[in-house]
Amino acid sequence: MPDPPWLFPDNPFDYVSLIRHPQGIGKIPENKTGTRIAVIGAGCAGLCAAWELMKIGLHPVIYEAGQNPDGSPRIGGRAYTYRFPGDPKALAELGAMRIPPVHGTVCQYMEQFGIDYGTPFPDPLVVPTTLYVKGKKYFIPLGGPLPGPIQKASNAWKKLIDPLVETWASSRPDLRARQWQDYVERFKDISFYEILNRQGLSKTDIDLFGSLGIGTGGFDSMFPISFLEIFRLAALRWETGQRLVKGGVGQIPEGFWHTPCPCRHFGNTSLKDLNKGQPLGAVTQIQTRPGEKIAVTDIKGRTETYEAVILTCSHRALETGIKISRNTFSDEVWTAIQNIHMTRSGKIFIRTREAFWKGHPPETTLNCTITDEAVRGTYLFDFEDTASGVICLSYTWEDAATKLHGLEEQELLDKSLDILKTIYGRDLISDQVEEVKTIFWEHQKGYHGAFKLNYPGQYEDQKALFLQSRPESDENANGVFLSGESTSFAGGWIEGALQSGLDAAMAVVRKLGGKIFTP
């Protein structure tokens, strides 16, 4: 039998059972109740850690650099659901937008907060799809076959990946850790492109496969990434059956922030109430001295001291925005912070007057569109409670995102509409456009990129970040714990952020002399 879906081979820990424990994740000594813990970053990792620590009697103090339009700190991080001002019922997921059902931790929290995630995400081939590559257009109806040239490239990929996944899935539970480590050693230092090249695919085959990707859109921008990252997606089924969050992914961090719960020291309260309605602002400095509490200074010049600090902000912020004592981390961890690769990513959204593609034969209207043109991926969204539609005109990664950086918002809109007009032979969209929203995560202050995916040669860096908050590490003596999806083996996923938040929360409990309730 395969392991339960929440068990990751790089990190086989049962987080779902941990958060289901009726007394919370652990118990702290009586004299530590009410102890203030700094949590830097109000995204999924930080708020998950803070919520669980609050429940067992600690006082998390939240800091956040991201801002709402009014200048107040913004809850959510890269789980960022944007509501169009002209119709707040029309949503655009600027960051995370897909939930694999095998990600048990995030699904458990969504069920706890009453968040609906039952609708399939409109990925390529899950819905009718238009593929436009090398100047040729292919329409793929729901359940229809791939075009011949694309099918050839897809078959070559399956010839590679299927035996690897089958071997992994059929391994005896007691041998799976060893089997996975064999895969790690085999693939960690080889790029995705090199693996495809070794399969004997021609450059044309590789280009065609890269345009469609492995299920969620073109992966050719990811060719320089370590193949281990891509293999993990396929072997653990993260690209299979992905779900759309009704009402927006942003409900997950909002759930941690707003939801009151019984707390050992504070009674029935919420993180919002405990933090007087909003987080403190950006952190500018963290000082650690042996034998002293950790000093945290915010953008207003206020300095507070804490017995422990959870750092969920982008690692790039530790190099460029936060002055932090060198002795906070070992040379190995500092090297990992400096090296780990952050993926560039951009999206261009519009709100349309109505979801005009509904009710028409899919071969005659706009579809989910995957192309080697500059927009790369186009996705369509409609809603039960408003006539408005939302189109992600363009979703790009890495160099494909960088190509668009020099354009202003109107230029991005015009370019996207022009490309889609070329693909479909007529302008289906322009007279429907009501509002535009664009984002490039590497331009967002404090973020410095969208999500972590390792290059070849960075597995040991990843391991150093992961282990920094683990009990087997001696890195945590001073009480500063790294968290966030970049520290996990599930970079780019809310699941990785939540698991890392729980790792940091457990590290705080241990630091204060408490006990973790072992699943």
Image (cartoon, rainbow, N blue to C red):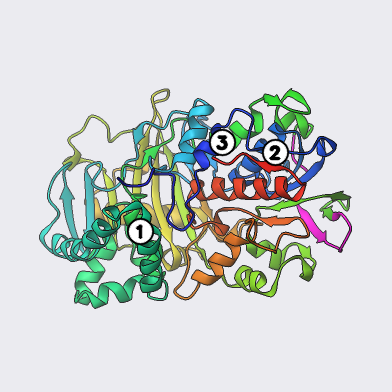
Looking at marks 2 and 1 on the same chain, the residue that comes earlier in the sequence is marked by 2
- Marks 1 and 3: in contact by CB < 8 Å? no
- Marks 1 and 2: in contact by CB < 8 Å? no
Circle 3 is placed at which residue position?
A: 19
Describe the element under mark 3 as helix, strand or loop.
helix
Disc 1 packing (10 Å; few <14; some 14–19; many ≥20): few
Looking at the image, which is closer to me, 292 or 448? Answer: 292
Asked if residue 290 lies in the magenta stretch, the reply is yes
Q: Position of residue 257 (x, y in %)?
A: 65, 33
- Disc 2 versus disc 1: nearer the observer: 1
Disc 2 packing (10 Å; few <14; some 14–19; many ≥20): many
Circle 1 is placed at which residue position?
A: 175
Residue interval drawn in magenta: 278-294
Circle 2 is placed at which residue position?
A: 53
Q: Is residue 288 above or below residue 367?
A: below
Asked if residue 289 lies in the magenta stretch, the reply is yes
- Marks 3 and 2: in contact by CB < 8 Å? no
Count the marks: how many? 3
> Residue 385 appears in which quarter of the rendering?
top left
Q: Residue furthest front?
A: 174
Q: How far is mark 2 from mark 1, CA to CA?
A: 35 Å
Check residue 379 in the rendering and tell me which mark sits there, or answer none. none
